[in-house]
Image: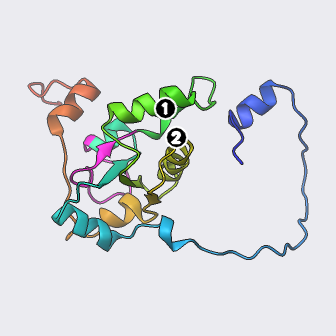
Amino acid sequence: RILDGGWVKWVQEKRPFEHGYITPKPGTFTVKPVASVIAVKDELKQLVKQPHPGTVIVDARSLEEYLGKEVSGIPRAGHIPSAIHVAWTGFLQPNATVKDLETITESLADKGLRQDQEVICYCTGGVRSGWVYFVLKLAGYRKVRNYPGSWWEWSRDFACPVEKDAMGLQQVLKVDPQVRPS
């Protein structure tokens, strides 16, 4: 289950919550990983080398990160070649609730995604892409996977290709390439 609107909406609606420490009781839940929803770096390297028309890679990070903005702690900026930019924030309304399904479906179609494709999502560490994974499933996409290693892993392997769009980044950041910093 997802708390639609998150903590902010919960508090705005004056819903109950508690302060203090709790000691949780041990549970009996057994983790059962589902390998079929996970993508790994070697698969993506192969997909970049030999694209498949039935599979798309989705970058869930900000547009600035996708275009190549330097981010602290990340050795290389840019995105996985052929990745489509689908920002994780694009599915949220201003009050942090999820947009309606029709709007989501139209937005995905506008990006060129189709429900018959396999979609592999990534971000920096698999969290934002996990959200996009959820939204795609909500929108009826059946073949969706998440790449948990994401950009942290990809950018550290110099055998993995990277694309940037310096001009696009300059436009987004409103930087004049003719003006040199002093």
The amino acid type found where label 1 is placed reads Ile
Residues at discs 2 and 1 in contact (Cβ within 8 Å): yes
Seen at 42% across and 66% down, the residue is: 149
Tell whether 26 sits left or right of 153. right
Q: Is residue 69 visible?
A: no
Measured from the top left, where is residue 108 in percent x and y?
40, 36
Is residue 83 within the magenta segment?
yes
Seen at 42% across and 62% down, the residue is: 147
Q: Nearer the viewer, residue 64 or 150?
A: 150
The amino acid type found where label 2 is placed reads Ala
Q: Is residue 152 above or below residue 177?
A: below
As helix, strand or loop, the secondary structure at mark 2 comes to: loop
Q: Residue 139: which disc?
A: 2
Label 2 – label 1 distance at C-alpha: 7 Å
* Residue at the extreme front of the image, as rendered: 116
Query: Earlier along the polypeptide chain: callout 2 or callout 1?
Result: 1
Please give the range of residues in magenta. Answer: 67-86
As helix, strand or loop, the secondary structure at mark 1 comes to: helix
Measured from the top left, where is residue 160 in percent x and y?
22, 66
Is residue 36 within the magenta segment?
no
Seen at 48% across and 58% down, the residue is: 126
Q: Nearer the viewer, residue 43 or 125?
A: 43
Residue behind mark 1: 104
Query: How dense is the environment of label 1, judged by Cα within 10 Å: few (below 14), some, or many (20 and up)?
Result: some
Measured from the top left, where is residue 165 in percent x and y?
18, 40
Q: Is residue 140 above or below residue 43?
A: above
Characterize the magenta stretch by its predominant secondary structure.
loop
Q: Is residue 141 visible?
A: yes
